[in-house]
Image (cartoon, grey):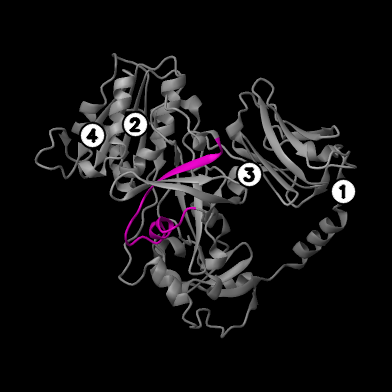
Amino acid sequence: MLNVPSTSFPVPNSQQRVSAGGRNKTPLKPGRSLMDWIKHKSSGKDLTGLKGRLIEVTEEELAKHNKKTDCWICIRGLVYNVTPYMEYHPGGEEELMKAAGIDGTQLFDQVHRWVNYESMLKECLVGRMAVKHSTLLKGLMSAENQEKTLLNGTLPSSVSEDVDNVFKPRYDWFQTDSTVTIVIYTKQKNMCLDMVTVDYQDKILREEITVEDYSFLLLIELNDTIEDFEVCTFNNTGKIEVNLQKEDHKMWKNLGQSLEGNNSFMKKSQRGTHYRKCRLASKTAINYNTRLFCFELPRCCHLQVPVGYHVYLKLTIEGIDVVKPYTPVSQDLLIDYIESDHSKKKYIYMMIKVYTNGSFTPHIDTLEIGDFVSISSPHGCFKMAQIEGMEDIFLVAAGTGFTPMVKLSQNVLSSSSSLRKLKLIFFNKTEADILWREELEKLCLSDRRFEVQFILSEPSRSWVGHKGQISSSLLSEALTRSKENSFAFICVCGPNGFVDQGLRFLEDLNFSKEDIFVFRE
C-alpha cells in the first residue's frame, strides 16, 4: 500500500522464516520518485476532484471508485482518492488496486502500517466513511459505560481477561516517601530487559512489554513528577519492576490518571508505532558511502533492541514524515572491546549506507551533531531460542544485510555452549564495499569458532579471494559443516533479489526451511 519505506523489513510478524517470496519494488517512470510526489501534491492541483470539499462516503459510493483511473481507498475510516498517486507508488499500481473501492486498513497494516499516510495523502483526502446508526449507537453506549478512574492499584476483574489463551499481564504499585514501584506480573519465563520499553516525559509514563506475539501497555499521567527510573526483570517468575524516583519526597494519593490505551493487551501487529526523539551524538565513516551513526536516547528512556530486531527512523522532509527501518549494531564488532563513555550511557548505533539519489539517507547524512531524529520501539520476531543447541550457524549476507548479523554474532559467540562454527558468507561488489573488514578479520583471530568468507562480484585484478554472485556452487562450497550431520542454522539478509535467489539455491542444496531465517532488508 502507501509506501514511504522501500522494501526494507516487512512489518512485525512478517520478518520470519522462509516465506513465499518477498515484496518487491516496482520500477517507476522517470519523475515519479518520492520527492517528485511531494512536489506534485504541493503544487496546488485538485487531487481529489472535489474542489476542496470533504464529503461523507457510504460503502456503496466507495465501491464505485474501483478502477485505476478512478480509485478511492479507505484507511481507518478516512477515504482517499489515490488515482493521482498510482504512478508514484513504489509497490506498483497492482498493490494499490488490491484495496480499490474497499476498506484497505488490514492490507495497509500487513505491508507497512508505520507509514504516515495522513501526511503522504493529505491533499488526496475525500472525506470520512459514513457511520452506520447501529455502530454509532454502540459507540455511545460504550462511552457512557466507560469510567474515568484514578489508579489506586486495584483493578476491575474484567481487565485480567486473557487473550487467545495468552495470560494478560496485571500490575500493582506501592510507594515509600522517595520511591514508587510499579510491579507487572506477566507469568512469562525468561523475561529480560529487551522485552520492556519505558518512556517518561512531562509526567506521562509509557511502558510497553512484549509477551510472546502480544503487547501489553501501561500509559499513565503520574500523580507527580519523577527524577528518574530503573527497570528490573525477574527471569524465573516473569515479574517486572519499574522503580520511580520521586522528585518531591512525599506520599502520593494515587498513581495517577489512566490515559487512553492504558492496560491494553493486543497483538504486536495491531499496536501503533511509538517514537521518541533521539539526539545525534556522533557520526563516523565506515567506508566511502556508509556511516556509523550514534544516537543518544532521552534521559528518561529504557530501550534495548533485541537481537535480530529493527527500529524505524523518522525524519520530516519537506513536510512529509519519511520512515526507514534499520537494524541497530554495536559500537564495535569485537566482543571484548573496552567500554567508552558512549557505551556506558544509553546509546543506539546504526550503520547506514548513504545513497546519493535516495529519499532519506542524504537527509540523515546532513544532520549535525546535536540534531534530533525520531526512533521507534523495536520491531521483529526473531527469537534466540531458534538457534539454541545449534552447532553450526551460517550467516549469508550482502552489503548492509550484514547489520542484523553483528549483534547475532556477538550474542552467539559469547553465550552459546554448543557452537562449533559461526561462519559469515559476505557478498559485496568491491573490496571498498566490505563493511568492518578489519574488525571481521580480527574476530577470526580472537575466536577460532568464527570464520568469514568475502565474495566479490566486481573484484579488482589484485583480489585473490572468492569471486562471483550468489549461486548454488558457491553456497555448496561455503556451507561446510564442522562435522557430518551437525545441527545447523542459516540466517540470510540482503536485497530482495539476493534473498530470493539464496532461498532457491538453499532449497536445491536440500536445506530444510525450518532451519532458515530471513531478515528482509
Residue 497: percent from left, percent from top? 30, 47
Q: In which image quadrant can residue 197 be found?
A: top right
Is residue 273 something one can see in this rendering? Answer: no
Label 4, label 3: how far apart the Cα atoms are: 40 Å
Work out whether 179 lies above or below 42.
above
- Mark 4 vs 1, N-terminal side: 1
For discs 4 and 1, the disc positioned in front in the rendered view: 4
Specify which label sits upstream in the sequence, 2 or 3: 3
Q: Which is more N-terminal, label 3 or label 4?
A: 3
Q: Nearer the viewer, mark 2 or mark 3?
A: 3
Secondary structure under tag 3 reads loop
Percent coordinates x, y for residue 160 in the rendering: 78, 36
Residue type at tag 1: Thr
Q: Residue furthest front?
A: 341
| Residue type marked 2 | Leu
Considering the numbered disc 4 on the image, is that residue within a helix, a strand or a loop? strand
Would you call the spot at circle 3 few (<14 residues within 10 Å), some (14-19), or many (20 or more)? some
Looking at the rendered structure, the kind of residue marked 3 is Arg
Residue identified by numbered label 2? 395
Q: Which residue is mark 1?
A: 149
The quadrant in which residue 52 appears is bottom right
Q: Looking at the rendered structure, which numbered label has been put on residue 299?
A: 3
Crowd rating for badge 2 (residues with CA inside 10 Å; few <14, some 14–19, many 20+): many
x, y percent for residue 76: 62, 61
Q: Which x, y percent locates residue 208?
A: 66, 41
Write down the residue under mark 4.
454
Query: For the residue labelled by badge 2, is the local secondary structure a helix, a strand or a loop?
Result: strand
Q: Amino acid at mark 4?
A: Phe
Relative to the observer, which residue lies in front, 213 or 226? 226
